[in-house]
Each structure stands twice: as structure tokens, then as C-alpha cells.
Image (cartoon, rainbow, N blue to C red):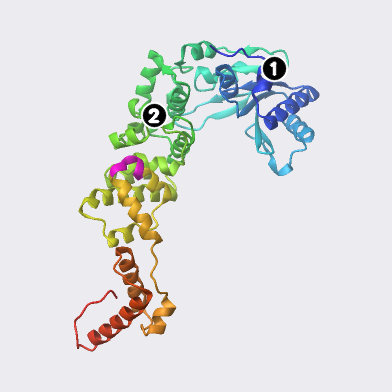
Amino acid sequence: MLTRLTMSALNARLPPNLGRLLRASEAAARATQCDLWAVGGVVRDLALGTPVNDLDLAVRGSLDALVTEVARRTQADPALVKHEARFGTASVSIDGARLDLAHLRAEDYVAPGALPVVRPTDSLEADLHRRDFTVNAMAFGLVGADRGRLVDPHGGLADLESRTLRVLHERSFEDDATRLWRGARTAALFRLAPDATTLRLIEAGARWLEPISGERLWAEFANTARRRRSGRAVDLLDEWGTLRGAHPQWTLPTASRAALRRRGPMPAARLAAVLLAPLPQAAREAILLRLSAPREARQAVADAARLLEAGRLSADGIDPARLAGLEGVHAKARTAAAWLAPEEQAPLQRELRRWERTRPPLTAEQLLALGVPRGPAVGQALAGLRRARYLGTLGSGADVRRNARAAIRRRMQREAGLADAEGWD
């Protein structure tokens, strides 16, 4: 059952600061003789009865005058008022809440995958037609002749009722293949299923990902990671062939699918580690390159792969030398590896944490005072002491100092060619 769209329902569902921005916008629109609509996600979320945390408004009239008036009425910090006149967009933020405004726009795509040429329009229907899916192409009138009325030229409300994902036109993915990612997020979040035509277009649309830049693909990837039901969205991207469309070696490993089951929002670097660490090194590096992934994500993937490899080898024992090679691995990689291989990772990461907490019983200064020569010998002695403490082979403090002196004597003898005894140094 969908929620009835009314002005009172909208005001009741907004957080206080966002409600304040909405009321200021309505008063400002009346003062500047602008028409105003709530558009996109806010209308969809209101109809579904889900939390409304984003507010996008479409404007017919002078956006400049409207933004200035909204800022004046809310006493917004000038630094938090953004206005991109050439794109016909603006935003106003107060106390953590943000309002996004845009003049009614139409778009023309000159080539598949190219950013659209945007032009202002006075037609609300043209503005809604440029959007991705019917459930995101609805408007609710706030100021003007449409006040209190739903504008739904593509049947988005009926599609919400039937839990259907439907594109607006046949060339949707050819125009902008990043809509495949947005479609997966929308379908996952609201449990929608594509109709037959949309599914056909989705499966054929993966080829249009080729001209999309890595930066745009990474932006969609990161946006997917931040959303609820991100694991289900990735499932759909794999089922639809969208991952392979982004890179032919990108498939969803069984371990990744299991690790993401019932997972929600997460950092993009962690999602990258979960998806890519189980893949062969050449494949994961090629995919990261295709996505123009930032350094943090590349490091998280590499570290998670190292942890997985170490976990597979841990059946032969967890040696301090192996732990030393893993020390300081990315925190997001640890979580990803633990999700991917919980039985192997639990003992490995427990010992890794114990190793990282282990400190040598003597400091460098104390070793120097005992006679260890400056230089590499100090580091070697500290490493040996740490290893011994981790293994539990050290005795009391007096024993440590006595062993240190003995080790120094052995080292001096070895250097003089008088002995070949080994110590923990």
C-alpha cells in the first residue's frame, strides 16, 4: 500500500532542518514568482513510506533570485550556498541539512556515453523525461498551479505499486550506461524487478559501458557501496552482465556473493576488496585500472588478497615472520578478508592483532646501554626480542638482560671468527 501524497505528509516526513529549508523555499518561490516542485527520489520515497533524507526541487523562474531569497530567509552561511549558474543548479545547507535546486532542464546526447548537453526549459514534462526510470520521474507541486498535485507522465506511481523497474525510453542505456548501476541500486533498495522490455535493454546495454570513463564508473561504484542493500545491488549487476560490461574479466566470485549477503552501506574501498581480492592478480589490477580506483581502494584490494593467501597457508602454522609481513594492513581489507574467509581469517587475524600488540621488552636506548653497537644490530636485536616475547620464550627482566649480554658476546665472537653460535639477535 502506497502512502497518499499530500503537503502535510511531505512536511511530516522531513527531518526538522530539511523541513525548515522546504518552508523557506516555498515562501521564497512565492516572493520571487517561481513555480516549484519536489522531484525524483523525494516523491518516490514519500509514496513508499521510506525515510525522506534528500530534497531535490525543480524551479521554473529565476533560480538566482530564488536561491538568494532562500539563503536570506534561512540565514544560511554564505560559504554553504553553492550556485552553478552555467548548469542551472544550486544548493543551500543549514545545520547538516542540504537542499538541492535546479532549473527545469532538457538534455541532448550527442554520442553514446558522452555527458549530455543541458539546456533550460519551461516544460516540467521535458525535465522529467530526461530522467532514468519511471519511479524516479515524478514531481509533486509545491508552489504554482500544480501545488498539492502529483505530476506522473510515465506511470511511476503504478510501477511502484507493482514493484516494477521500467526505463523511460529505448535509448536510455545507449545515452547513459551509468543508468545500469543506478537501476541496480534502485531495484535492490526498493525490491523492484525490471519488466520484460527493461530487462532486454539492460542485457543489451552493457556494451554501452565501454565509452564511459573510469572516473564516472568509480563514482557509480562508490555510490553503490554507500547505499542500503549494496550486496543485492552487486548481485543484480552481475546477473545483468553489467560487471562484465565494465571489464570482461569482472565476475562475482562465490565467496564475494556470500560475503555480501545481507550487507548494507560500506566504504567503497571495502566493497572493492570484497569483490576483487578473490580474483587473480592480473584481473583485479586490470579492473581497478578500468575503474580509475583511488589509491585507498587499490591498497585495500591488495592487502585483502595478501590476507586471504596468508589464511590459506596458516594451516601450516602462523609464523611471526608471516605476521610481520602483514602488519599494518588496511583496516577495510581486514574486514573484507574476514567476510570472505571467516574460518581461515579468524585465527590468522587474532594472531596478527596479538603480534601487533607485542613489543620488545627493551628499548633501543636500553640495548645501546647494554653494549649493542649502533646501526643495524639494534634493529635486529629489537626484532629478535619481539619474536621471542611473542613466542613466550623470554623469562624475567633479569633473564632478558642476561641473554642480551650473552647475545652481544656471541655476536662479537662471530665477528672475530671465534664462534658460530646463534642467538635471538
Mark sitting on residue 8: 1
Q: Is residue 73 left or right of residue 38?
A: right
Residue stretch in magenta: 337-343
Tell me if residue 299 comes above or below residue 41 in the rendering.
Answer: below
Q: Position of residue 156 (x, y in %)?
A: 53, 14
**Residue located beneath label 2 in the image:** 208
Q: Is residue 49 left or right of residue 397?
A: right
Tell me the residue at 69%/41% (across/down).
Answer: 80
Is any part of residue 305 visible from this angle?
A: no
Tell me the residue at 47%/11% (across/down).
Answer: 162
Tell me the residue at 42%/79% (across/down).
Answer: 366
Is any part of residue 76 visible from this angle?
A: yes
Disc 1 packing (10 Å; few <14; some 14–19; many ≥20): few
Tell me the quarter of the picture where residue 146 sits: top right
Mark sitting on residue 264: none
In the picture, the quarter occupied by the C terminus is: bottom left
The kind of residue tagged 2 is: Trp
Q: Position of residue 59 (x, y in %)?
A: 68, 24
Q: Which of the two labelled residues, at mark 2 and mark 1, occupies the earlier sequence position?
A: 1
Disc 2 packing (10 Å; few <14; some 14–19; many ≥20): many
The kind of residue tagged 1 is: Ser
Tell me if residue 34 comes above or below residue 375 in the rendering.
Answer: above
Q: Are marks 2 and 1 in contact (CB under 8 Å)?
A: no
Is 11 magenta? The answer is no
Q: Secondary structure at mark 2?
A: helix
Q: Is residue 110 left or right of residue 51?
A: left
Q: Considering depth in this image, is 87 or 256 the residue closer to the camera?
A: 256
Q: Position of residue 205 (x, y in %)?
A: 38, 25
Mark 2 or 1: in front is: 1
Q: Considering depth in this image, is 157 or 330 the residue closer to the camera?
A: 330
Q: Position of residue 114 (x, y in %)?
A: 47, 32
